[in-house]
Image (cartoon, rainbow, N blue to C red):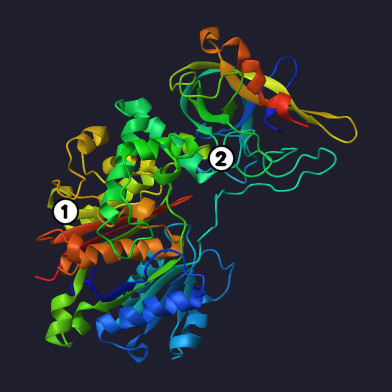
Amino acid sequence: MSDDGIWILGIHMTKFGKHPDKDVIDLAAEAALGALADAGVTMRDLGVLAAGNLMSMGAPTGQLLQKQIGQTGIPVYNVSNACATGATALRTVIMAIKAGECDLGLAVGVEKLAGAGLLAGGTRKQEAPTWTPQGRYGAVAPIDGRIGTETMPGVFAQIGLEYGHRYGGTSFELFARISAKNHAHSTLNPLAAYTKAMSVEEIMNDVMIAYPNTRPMCSANCDGAAAAVLVSGAKLRTLDPDQRRRAVKVSASVLTSDPWTESCQVLPDVNTLTRQAALAAYESSGVSPDDLDLVELHDCFATAELVHYDNLMLCPEGGAVDFFESGAPFRDGSLPVNVSGGLQSKGHPIAATGIANVYEICQHLRGEAGDRQIEGARVGLAHVIGLGSACGVHVLERAA
Amino acid sequence: MDYLRLEPSPCLLAHECVACGARFFDRRNACAACSGTSFREAELPTEGELRTFTIVSYAAPGIPVPFVAGVVDCGGTSVRANVINVVPDADHVRTGMKVRLATYVVGVDSEGTEAIGFGFEPLDGATTPADARETEPGKEQP
């Protein structure tokens, strides 16, 4: 970070859930206009726009958004980086400001995902009448289901059980209890897709998707958008005292990709890249895990939340089960995790998630989180990962 | 699969980077670990340990469920595969279990050619009740 730092001047998210009457641009516009109003600026003040969207198949989301809310001729970046798309849009704007190209910019992430069902990577659809080896593996037929699984619930189930195999202490019930925590947290979040508490028994007895992940332990596909206005420290000093008071400092913005590890060739390694992103974020911000007042992490599945306690160094290495059992990640615990309800209950409109996680932290740092406010929150961390693989970590601090 | 060799006895073959020893199953433009461009063939042990798994109950249309997917550690090389010839529930599959390579007929094409697939089956027969045969993926193919 430059000495001036980078600040979030305004931020907004739509309600997550089903929005049958709104298209991608309607949702993006609602989030963008909300963030601009929250920041007290207009499209004319901005020097850069980054728009994240995954499912619109290459449509220029940023330019389409501009047509609805203001075409000012500024550079637009349409970004796509799996489930880390929103964090990547945020970081694109941060890089432009750090480079001195402008001092105000807008990042938007938006997705229409309600009813999308099971998301799988790279599944070969068609079976030919005769066997013909195809692709990099020379397979004669689709390999999903024959050579392991490519579905996300299955991939992350394996990641969770691998952690349990290595360190012990995990069980089907433990993962269900992690999910129950997040579903309970969501009851206080009016913007969450689901706001219903679920008992451990209900979660364990629900539809099994990929053991040990039952349906409520999987991220909720839904519609939604989130947007943030970012500003340089120099520009912030010229703004109104009320804008300065509510601004949130971006103390670290880190993006990593998967470094080579032996096993990541066959099962995505969400651990190494997250650990590296967290380390870099702690080093560049000077914040340590002990300083954090709350964390929003990428609980795309209950099994994922467990491994990320460890990857984000919220506990000693191998200590994620003990960390959970201590009560620390509950909203009344020593380090609340996913008080928004997380991806399992708040929802996971893919490209919006990275900015939505930052939104949640900002609401608490500003003391504007309503019923779910973590009292006295000063420092928070927002984390997302996407396969395969990208990891975004942002450390945020309240204005002094 | 290009990396399944059937004769003289079934085994998996990896492309091994000559420079650093990293192993890959697909064809490679260069090594992901060291960017080397020379590879040799490396035969994997046919026995290994199940490092992790999941039991997939919900999959894309046309994929028989439930099936057990996992990652097998074959002498230090990770292999993605199904665990076959086992009852697909958490009482019969556990991490750390010893498994061995097994092949089965995936299906027969319109010209009568059989496709052979591979999986790993429990080495310890005690985890494989007699009724496990009913869940063998090869038996469910058209």
Give the number of marks: 2
Which mark, residue A390?
A: none
According to the image, label 2 marks what residue?
A: B58
Residue at 40% from the left image edge and 73% from the top image edge: A108
Residue A179 placement: quadrant: top left
SS at mark 1 in the image: loop
Which mark, residue A292?
A: 1
A72 relative to A190, above or below: below
A99 relative to A336, above or below: below
> What is the distance, in whole Å, between disc 1 and disc 2 at their CAs?
38 Å
> Seen in the image, is A354 located left or right of residue B59?
left
Residue at 13% from the left image edge and 53% from the top image edge: A291
SS at mark 2 in the image: loop
Image spot of residue A294 (x, y percent): 19, 54
Image spot of residue A68 (x, y percent): 48, 86
Amino acid type at mark 2: Tyr
Answer whether residue A261 is visible to the viewer in this image: no
Amino acid type at mark 1: Leu
